[in-house]
Image (tube, rainbow, N blue to C red):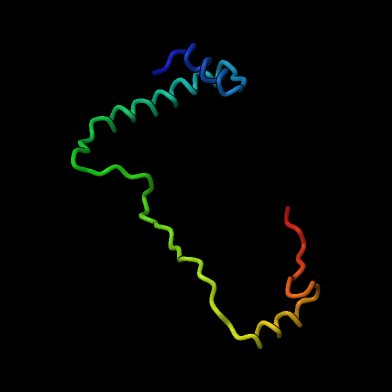
Amino acid sequence: MLSKQQVEHIAKLARIQLSPEEIEKFQKDLGGVLEYFDVLKEVDVTGIDAMMHSVDLQNVTREDIPQPCSEKIVEQLLEAFPEKTGRYLKVKSIL
């Protein structure tokens, strides 16, 4: 179990005020958490690879390659766009 001074130090680091009753409660609660870590230290993990996440996810990306399209489609898109200068399309700034 943690000492009263240790709980007060943790509260000071967390910038929280604790009443004497809360200090006693957290002595027991935080002590229980730390005791559980001692139990976890006893588990044999030899031969188990370390992992950063419980689900093995990978980014799915593709190379950004421009695809050719017909001049007719380009002209239709340019005609449909509300604001343009020549072949450049005017959009709202985002920054």
In this view, the residue farthest toward the top is: 5
Question: In this view of the protein, which residue sits in the foreground, 9 or 36?
Answer: 9
The spot of residue 46 in percent (x, y) is 19, 38
For residue 48, which quarter of the picture? top left
Horizontal side of 59 relative to 72 (left or right) equals left
Which quadrant would residue 55 be assigned to in this image?
Answer: bottom left
- The x and y percentages for residue 91 are 76, 66
Left or right: where 82 falls relative to 6: right
Report x, y in % for residue 14: 57, 24
At 20% from the left and 36% from the top, the residue drawn is 44
Q: Residue furthest front?
A: 86
The outermost residue toward the bottom is 72
Q: Quadrant of the N terminus?
A: top left
Q: Residue at x 39, y 29 (%)?
A: 33
Horizontal side, residue 31 vs residue 9: left or right: left
Q: Where 44 sits versus 51, above or below? A: above
Rendering coords of residue 35 (x, y %): 34, 26
Between residue 34 and residue 92, name the one nearer to us: 92
Residue 31: quadrant of the picture = top left
Give the camera-side residue of 87 and 61.
87
**Relative height, residue 65 to residue 15 (above, below):** below
The residue lying toward the viewer, choosing from 83 and 38, is: 83
The structure residue drawn at horizontal position 38% and vertical position 48%, both measured from the top left corner, is: 53
**Is 13 rendered above or below residue 54?**
above
Q: Tell me which residue sits at (46%, 20%) in the image.
A: 27
Number of numbered discs visible in the structure rendering = 0
